[in-house]
Amino acid sequence: MLLEINPLNPDNRLINSVIEKLKEGAVIIYPTDSVYALGCDPESKKGVEKLFHIKNSDPSKRQLTFMCDSISMASTYANQISNSNFRFIKDHTPGPYTFILPATNNLPKILNVKNKTFGFRIPNHRIPTELIRALGRPILTASLKTLSQDEDERFYMYPEDIYSDYSLSVDLIIDGGPGSLEQSTVIDLTDGTPTVIREGKGNVETE
């Protein structure tokens, strides 16, 4: 199913219909301020298993990323956010950045996480922000790569192309307009000093 949602003024009725599906265990594809992404409710065993089946990976061995609407939401899962890290995150959010922090035991048990860290994003995009607020918790997220082996086409710009490749794999694809072909910048904050471990759409000065 391809569902068109206005990225500048999302319809609450459509947002709520997506949330109902997420709570029932759906895996969706949705726009962000970087690339289109796979997402599910991290409290749904069915959704988590399906997402990682699509990614062909084990959640216990993979760096998890939560799409959040605020630092406060992310802090539920972070062991501790120092004052300096808080200021750094605040200066770069919302935006196309993924922050890596030490994790607490508050991560959903169904994820069976063995990693002691997790990643989170606070996107500058109305659709994921409204979805997260309506769900009341983060969306477990993974970047959506193309099925093409061409390195120049790793991500999708157009929802129609996503639908062509993934309509039989996921429960819902949100058309929020053209996406970006550049992933978020990943910043490791686990040792107290920001370290860029993947350069992406977001520019950052760590000095």
Image (spheres, rainbow, N blue to C red):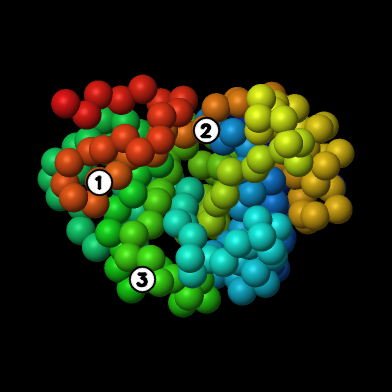
Helix, strand or loop status at disc 3:
loop
Q: In this view, does 196 lie to the left or right of 49?
A: left
* 14 or 125: nearer the viewer: 125
Task: Report which quarter residue 6 is drawn in.
Answer: top right
* 126 or 202: nearer the viewer: 202
Q: Do the residues labelled 3 and 1 touch (CB within 8 Å)?
A: no
**Where does the image place residue 71, in percent across and percent down from the top left?**
32, 47
**Where does the image place residue 174, in percent across and percent down from the top left?**
72, 41
Q: Which residue corresponds to the image point at 34% horizontal and 59% vertical from the top-left?
A: 117
Q: Which amino acid does label 2 sit on?
A: Gln
Q: How crowded is mark 1: few (under 14 residues within 10 Å), some or many (20 or more)?
A: many
Mark 2 or mark 3, which is nearer the start of the sequence? 3
Q: Which residue corresponds to the image point at 80% horizontal and 55% vertical from the top-left?
A: 169
Q: Name the residue under label 3.
A: 106
Helix, strand or loop status at disc 2:
loop
In this rendering, the answer to whether 2 lies above or below 73 is above
Marks 3 and 1 sit apart, C-alpha to C-alpha, by: 19 Å
Q: Mark 2 points at which residue?
A: 183
Mark 1 or mark 3, which is nearer the start of the sequence? 3
Q: Mark 1 points at which residue?
A: 189
